[in-house]
Image (tube, rainbow, N blue to C red):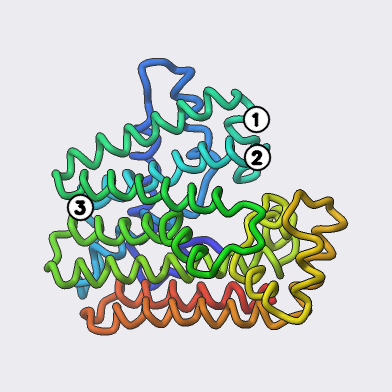
Amino acid sequence: MALLSHLSALPTLEDDLALVESKLENAVIAKDPYLTEIAKHLITAGGKRVRPGFTIASSAVGQSNTVSVPDEVLMGGVAVELVHLGSLYHDDVMDEAEMRRNVPSVNAVWGNHTAILAGDFLLARASEIAASLGTEVAALLARTIGELCEGQILELQSAYSLTRSEDSYELSIAGKTASLLSTACRIGGLTGELEREVIDQLTNFGHAYGMAFQIVDDILDIIATEDQLGKPAGNDLIEGVYTLPVLLALKSDIGDQLRELLGKELSTDARDQALTLIRSTDAVEKAYARAQVWAQKAKAELESLPSSPATNALFAATNHLLERANSAG
């Protein structure tokens, strides 16, 4: 479900995100039309724009009446989305992905070298925008890019590992997912010139939401259908990424059977067997309970914020997150 549907309590968001869309395209115009085409490839393919949406909503939590956000907030949203897009270009190279957002991936069309350089270009443009918003935003975004890399490296280190710990898993998703969502909210608070205490609460909210978001995403990879996911279920298993439901299933009564299948590259039949085994346990239920813990932490950070359309929208987004897993199951 699109971001607009679960942030609908913020009626100005649709117009603000339309401005973000235009600014995104303008931000990646290069001197060479060839690079511009590549840099725009995933932007024009669409996307939920979750991160700029959270930047916009966070900046407006103190506003009782809804008005469009200032240009600085919009550009903060553009910066975080460019970091997200740049990371996707790199991810698709590492995963040898052929499709992204229902279009051929950049690496599939233009090759790995070009995709890596184009991803770097997007990160450079994000950094340039962040610098225009002040040294604090620039330092924050630079640190976040580092955290994204650390989280991804941790995941690569544990590929096909049957001894991956739950702590290692959470540390990885804190870097690769939660860090950018946390930063999106913090940049919203900074560019919206909110009080420091509120900025810190929004930062904590974004982190907790990001943790719940990734756990739910990993649950969906186990339980959802191909139609619901837009890709085959169990893709993480194929790539040797053993997420929380898998780690919990390995500790269950069918753990030995699952170990016989995992720890190596899987055929489609072996993947389907593994999915059936995992679904037969309470691992998904336990993983969902962990997502609920993080979602409750996210809500707790919002409870002392002023009641406003933006605050209500962030509450609604957190509730919707858990509904995704319920509806798929």
Give the residue displayed 43% in from the left and 77% down from the top. Answer: 294
Residue that badge 1 annotates: 108
Q: Amino acid at mark 3?
A: Pro
Q: Is residue 75 left or right of residue 265?
A: left
Query: Which numbered disc, 2 or 1, marks the residue that appears first in the sequence?
Result: 2
Give the residue displayed 65% in from the left and 30% down from the top. Answer: 108
Give the residue displayed 79% in from the left and 52% down from the top. Answer: 266
Residue 111, image quadrant: top right
In the image, 169 versus 79, the foreground residue is: 169
Residue that badge 2 annotates: 97
Considering the numbered disc 2 on the image, is that residue within a helix, a strand or a loop?
Answer: loop
Disc 2/disc 1 C-alpha distance (Å): 7 Å
In the rendered view, tell whether residue 102 sits above or below residue 242. above
Location of the C terminus by quadrant is: bottom right
In the rendered view, tell whether residue 65 sits above or below residue 260. below
Q: Amino acid at mark 1?
A: Ala
x then y, percent, for residue 32: 41, 15
Q: Are marks 2 and 1 in contact (CB under 8 Å)?
A: yes
Q: Are marks 1 and 3 in contact (CB under 8 Å)?
A: no
Q: Which residue lies most toward the top here?
A: 32
